[in-house]
Amino acid sequence: MTSEPIEPTTASVLRRLAEDLAVRAGTMVFEARRAGTGTIDTKSTPTDMVTEHDRASEQLIVGAIRTARPDDAIIGEEGTADAGTSGIQWLIDPIDGTTNFMYGLPGYAVSIAAVDEHGSLAGAVYVPATRELFSAARGEGATLDGAPIHCSTTTDLGQALVATGFNYSRDVRVVQAARIARMIGEIRDIRRLGAAAPDLCSVAAGRVDAYFEEGLGAWDLAAGVLIASEAGCITGDFTGGRVRPAEVLVSNPALFEPMRALIAAASAR
């Protein structure tokens, strides 16, 4: 990517485009789900699913970005890999939480982010079932349906409501579940809602106090991590390094180090 600086107004422009496309794609898949799941295939494991609506959502988003910003790079979960020359790359999760979508559960979302050499620049997460639009741009704060949001102020780890997710691999899930069993007595409770982007937005909005997960894709995190950061959250991996798809921990500032230590202790047993 180019090292040329991004104009201050670009983040706002990209945010508005991400918001518009997330709502358009989310509305489309929500209405389509009323008629059924359509064609379903598997990817990495028998429980890692993709539907025709995942692909249709990605097609809508990619087509619109190509029209509006033909020089940008685009990476989509369902296979899009367009090179670009502008220094901006789009990361798209056309349906984050496909299992929820398949089962008719509300916890799925469309996640779209624009990134530059410094990380996420603008992003939006739209939850069709609740018609909630979360968004942020670097340095502009985070919003829910246009109103500013902020992370929780919980300071006691024992009172922390923590969200997490599990891997598609059965063997990895067994290890993760054992770790949760060792953590559960040290926190208020666990929530496992089934989609990374809405979980990250829940931390941003103060609906949960922390979230951690492993083995995600860059498209799972790009918008949600920016929204959480702009809402005042601390983000990182399990060692306190930079957040990455392999390991993500997001919480309010007071709980980040206690959560990191708890994860480490529970993982070492």
Image (tube, rainbow, N blue to C red):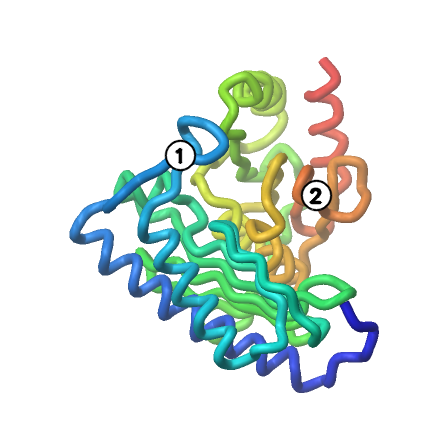
The quarter of the image holding the C terminus is top right
Answer with mark 1 or mark 2, whichever residue precedes in sequence: 1
In the displayed structure, 3 sits above or below 80; it is: below
Q: Estimate the x, y position of residue 214 in percent, counting from the top left.
A: 63, 35
> Going 54% across and 17% down the picture, which residue do you hit?
171
Neighbour class for label 2 at 10 Å: few (<14), some, many (≥20)?
many
In the displayed structure, 190 sits above or below 140; it is: above
- The answer to whether 178 appears left or right of 132 in the picture is right
In the displayed structure, 146 sits above or below 155; it is: below
Q: Estimate the x, y position of residue 261 in percent, counting from the top left.
A: 76, 31
> Going 62% across and 77% down the picture, which residue do you hit?
71
Neighbour class for label 1 at 10 Å: few (<14), some, many (≥20)?
few
Name the residue nearer the viewer: 32 or 108. Answer: 32
Dot 1 amino acid type: Thr
Pointer 1 with pointer 2, Cβ within 8 A: no
> Going 62% across and 24% down the picture, which residue do you hit?
183
Which quarter of the picture shows residue 149? bottom right
Which quarter of the picture shows residue 104? top left
Q: Estimate the x, y position of residue 85 in percent, counting from the top left.
A: 70, 73
Name the residue nearer the viewer: 159 or 94. Answer: 94
The quarter of the image holding the N terminus is bottom right
Residues at marks 1 and 2, CA–CA distance in whole angstroms: 37 Å
Q: Which residue is mark 1?
A: 42
| Residue 255: mark | 2
The secondary structure type at the circle numbered 1 is strand
In the displayed structure, 113 sits above or below 41; it is: below
Q: Estimate the x, y position of residue 180 in percent, counting from the top left.
A: 57, 23
The secondary structure type at the circle numbered 2 is helix
